[in-house]
Amino acid sequence: MNKDRRTIDQLRSQRWYDSQDMRGFAHRQRTQQMGLRREEFMGKPVVGILNTWSDLSPCHAHLKDRAEAVKRAVWAAGGFPVELPAMSLGEVMVKPTTMLYRNFLAMEAEELLRSHPIDGVVLLGGCDKTTPGLLMGAISMDIPSIFCPAGPMLNGKWKGKTLGAGTHTRKYWDELRSGNITQEDWVDLESRMTRSNGTCNTMGTASTMTSIVDAMGLTLPGASSIPAADSGHIRMASECGSRIVEMIWEDLKPSDFLTRESFLNGARCYMAMGGSTNAAVHLIALARRAGVELTLDDLDAVAREIPVLANIFPSGEYLMEDFFYAGGLPALLKRLDGHLDLDAGGISGKALGEWIAPAECYDDDVIRHFGEPVTPGAALAVLRGNLAPNGAVIKASAANPELARHRGRAVVFDNHADLVARIDDPALEITADSVLVLRNAGPKGAPGMPEWGALPIPKKLLAQGVRDMLRISDARMSGTHYGTCVLHVAPESAVGGPLALVRDGDEIELDIDARRLELCIDEQELEARRQAWRAPSPRIDRGYTAIFQEHVTQADQGCDFDILQNGQRQDEPEIF
Ligand code: FES
Ligand code: MG
């Protein structure tokens, strides 16, 4: 990709700043209103910094400072930095689920870039939905873009034990409910588990997504592994500022290097990391924005080829801080020798093979050799059958191997409220072999496809020592959670998918090796139930949620809005 370097008059920002009409006057005048001298911004590339910092987004608490590091480097490189706030989507605080707003952020990012005088952008994010959200928008706008990942938090520590965010919350919640830890322990844990700024230190959706986009060349090489609290993280942010100015002159855009091969590299990284099932949705959404064909079956094929090599919770035993010290993402990718397209490009201007070549691994237990995987199961298995004609997913590496082939009777919960009301009812007829089914929890049905897919084990079974059961839903599951949970069943029940037709006592069969998920009733009976089924009316009829329910696609298509996946790129705005 040998393009001519661009000159200042070719940059889109100059249509605002260099125009010799009344509006051009206003753009220059209003910038000087903020105390900037004309020579500080005229004739310079304008770098947008989209910042998802907020006081309710603990994973992004340090991004306020990181934006300053980006700015200082942009100034030094001869650019003009402008910071714009974007929806922060702090995973833990946002109700009912950040997934409802991923597309909102994607639209916001795209429109912020389109409507302002911005030549290139540094995207500051990292908490689960912010990585796909920001990048979906930037890919659609297709201007020079760097993703600056927030970085993982430090290891949690409590009573000599190392604790991972999310994973251990669920573990100790179960221990509290079964009486193995005290209420005092539980309160104490609140302040011990999350010790610094940064995203979850487990292999949750945050580190899954930042690692994937790192492998795809959308960050500075290896940036995703640097802990948020490390001074190297500040230097990485500063380097984003220098590099984006250069990329603007080079005119290096996402469409110049995002190919099917780079998405497959991202998928290989996803599986080797033992990443979150959520990435299956986000990666497909990103690919569709880039105009690249990527399906669930592609992901399944990659998962069969690439074992889990990163020994990180919840599939493994370490955390992201340990992963960084062991050599981080470059060391992991080097272990995928022979399985990656090493010619794939990226924002650094270097081919993947070039930047991973010098990587070394310093701990073979944290980053395994290809022949010594962390788990026998793959990070992802795509299941099909009469219960999931368009696919469902399971994180086999975090599932109980004893349940990998299982047949049991369904215990059906019609929606989340029903689940909460009845799961701990002592009268609930259920055994460890039962199959927990939750429906109306998908993209349209919930709406927003919340992380309800790791259905709680009934209290009375917990007391008997049961820690895992087969669970099936059209919801998602947090990447930090574990268990034999079949997720993302498509089509979802709210649009008439077969999940809507399951009844208490029906037998369901799972076979992960055969990639099968079957409702064991005959086709005639299924058809009779289908005829009798009535679609639920949308629960929300106003505002953004109503738009979401109208336009969201199913999980196998990435849950993007149909109106954003399709259609021609919008032209540059007219400037009046
Ligand atoms: Fe933000 Fe886990 S809550 S990354
Ligand atoms: Mg998460």
Image (cartoon, helix red, strand yellow):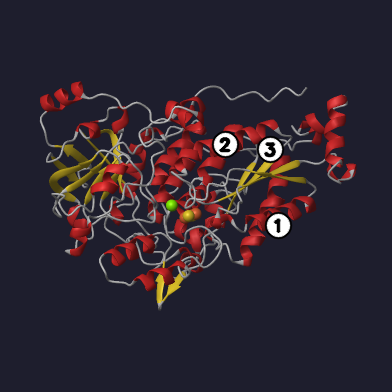
Q: Position of residue 40 (x, y in %)?
A: 86, 46
Q: Which residue is mark 3?
A: 251
How crowded pointer 1 is (Cα within 10 Å; few <14, some 14-19, many 20+) is rated as: many
| Vertical relation: 269 (above or below) 161 | above
How far apart are labels 3 and 1 at the CA level?
Answer: 23 Å
**Front: mark 3 or 1:** 1
Ligand 1 is within 8 Å of the C-beta of the residue at disc 3: no
User: Of the residues under marks 3 and 1, which one precedes in the sequence?
Assistant: 1
Q: Quadrant of the C terminus?
A: top right
Residue type pointed to by label 2: Gly
Q: Which residue is mark 1?
A: 69
Image label count:
3
Q: Quadrant of residue 68?
A: bottom right
Q: Residue at x 29, y 66 (%)?
A: 175
Q: CA distance from mark 1 to mark 2?
A: 23 Å
For the residue marked with disc 1, what is the amino acid? Ala
Name the element at disc 3.
Answer: loop
Secondary element under disc 2, as helix, strand or loop, is helix
In the rendered structure, are the residues bearing label 2 and label 3 in contact, judged by CB atoms less than 8 Å apart? no
Instruction: Kindly identify which residue carries mark 2.
Output: 137
250 in relation to 153, above or below = above
- The answer to whether residue 491 is visible is no
Of residues 7 and 80, the one nearer the viewer is: 80
Mark 3 touching mark 1, by CB under 8 A? no
| SS at mark 1 in the image | helix
